[in-house]
Image (spheres, rainbow, N blue to C red):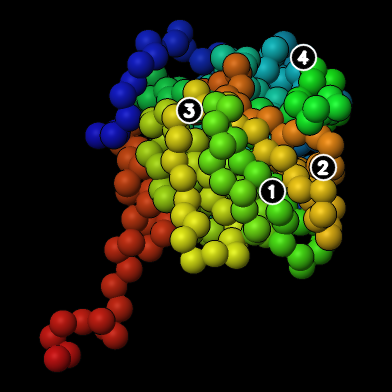
Amino acid sequence: MSNFVNNYPKRPAFRRIGLMGRAGKSSVVETLNELILLLQNRNLSIVIDTETAAIEGLNVDFGQMDNQRFQIVPRQKIGEYCDLAIVVGGDGSMLQAASVLAGTDVPVLGINRGRLGFLADVNPDELTEKVSQVLDGKYWLVERFLLKFQIVQNDLQGQPTDAVIHEDVALNDIVLHAGKSVHTIDFKLKINNSDVYRQHADGLIVATPTGSTAYSLSAGGPIIHPTIDAICLVPMHPHTLTSRPLVVAGSSQIAINIHKDNRTQPMVGADGKASAPLDNDQTLLIAKHHKTLLLLHPNGYSFYEACRTKLNWNLYSEEFAFDKY
C-alpha cells in the first residue's frame, strides 16, 4: 500500500511511451533495450529523444523503423509526443528529465541505474513486472513542486527591481555557495519580507521535500515527506553553534543579500547545474515555481520503505547485536 494520497484519476491507457537515458553505463543500454522489447511486444508507440537515440548499443534499426510506431524527437520537446515518460538512470537523470517535463502533465517513471534512486524508484530486476503494472493501469500519480530562483538587480536604495539577471528552476534544491573558495559567505536572509538572520557560512541549501533526501540531507537537513508543502533551508557549515535547519511554508517568498565585504564571489546553482554569480548589489529571490512535475509510482511504492532500504535504516550488524553483552 502506498503512503501517498492519490489525488489524480487514472489516465486512459498509455499508448505513446517516451524513453530517456544518459550515456556512460552499459547497464543503462541494457535496460533501455529491455524496455524497447517490452513496449514493442505490447504494440505501443515509442518516442526517444535525440540524446538517448545517440547512445551506442540500442537495439533499434533507425533506418528501417516505422515512423508511426517509433519517433526520435528533440529532448526539449519530448513531452509533446508522449503520454508517459520512462527515465533510465539515477536521480541525476530524473532531474534532467524534470527540467523538460515539468508543466507538461506527462507523468514520469524512473528505472534506477544510479546509486540511491529516490526519484528513480523501480529496480532493474523488477522492470518487466513493474512497468507492465503501470501499463495495465496499476499506479499512483504524485505531484511534486519545483522552486524557481531569480537574481535581480537592486535599485540605489538596495531594494530588488524587476531587472532579472539570471533565473533557473530546481526540483531538488537551490544552493548558494562560495564557488571554488574556502572562505565563508556573509549573507542576510529574509522570508516574506521579514528579517530572519545574518549568517556566516559556506552557503545555504534551499530544498523542496523532494530534495530533502539529497544534498540537504548530507548537510544535516531533515527528511520531509514529499507530500508536505514546505521548503527547507539548511546552512552549510555555519560559523555558529546555534544555526539549525529551518522548515517554512511552501508559499514562502525567500530573499537573500550578500554583504559587500565578502572575500569571495558567491555563486547560485539549481540541481547541480552551472552556477551564476551573485553580487552585493543584487538580490537572490526564491519561491515556488508555477510548474509541477508528475511522478508515477507503481502500486506498492512506499516512501518509508525507500528510506529504510536506501538509507540503511534497517541495516543489521553483529557489532550491535544485543546478545553479545
Label 1, residues with CA under 10 Å away: few <14, some 14-19, many ≥20 = many
Q: Could you say which disc has been placed on residue 280 in the image?
A: 2
Dot 4: element:
loop
Question: Residue 38, image x and y in percent?
Answer: 54, 32
Give the Cα separation between the discs numbered 2 and 1: 9 Å
* C-alpha gap between disc 3 and disc 4: 44 Å
Q: CA distance from mark 1 to mark 4?
A: 55 Å
Amino acid type for the residue under numbered disc 2: Asn
According to the picture, the residue beneath numbered tag 1 turns out to be: 187
Name the outermost residue toward the bottom: 325
> Counting residues from the N terminus, which is met first, the one under dot 3 or under dot 4?
4
Q: Are marks 2 and 4 in contact (CB under 8 Å)?
A: no
* Secondary structure under the numbered disc 3 in the rendered image: loop
Query: Measuring 76% from the left and 18% from the top, which residue is drawn there?
Result: 77
Q: Which residue is mark 4?
A: 67
Residue 250 is tagged as: 3
Marks 2 and 4, the one that precedes in the sequence: 4
Q: Residue at x 55, y 26 (%)?
A: 192
- Residue 42: percent from the left, percent from the top? 52, 22
Image quadrant where one finds the N terminus: top left
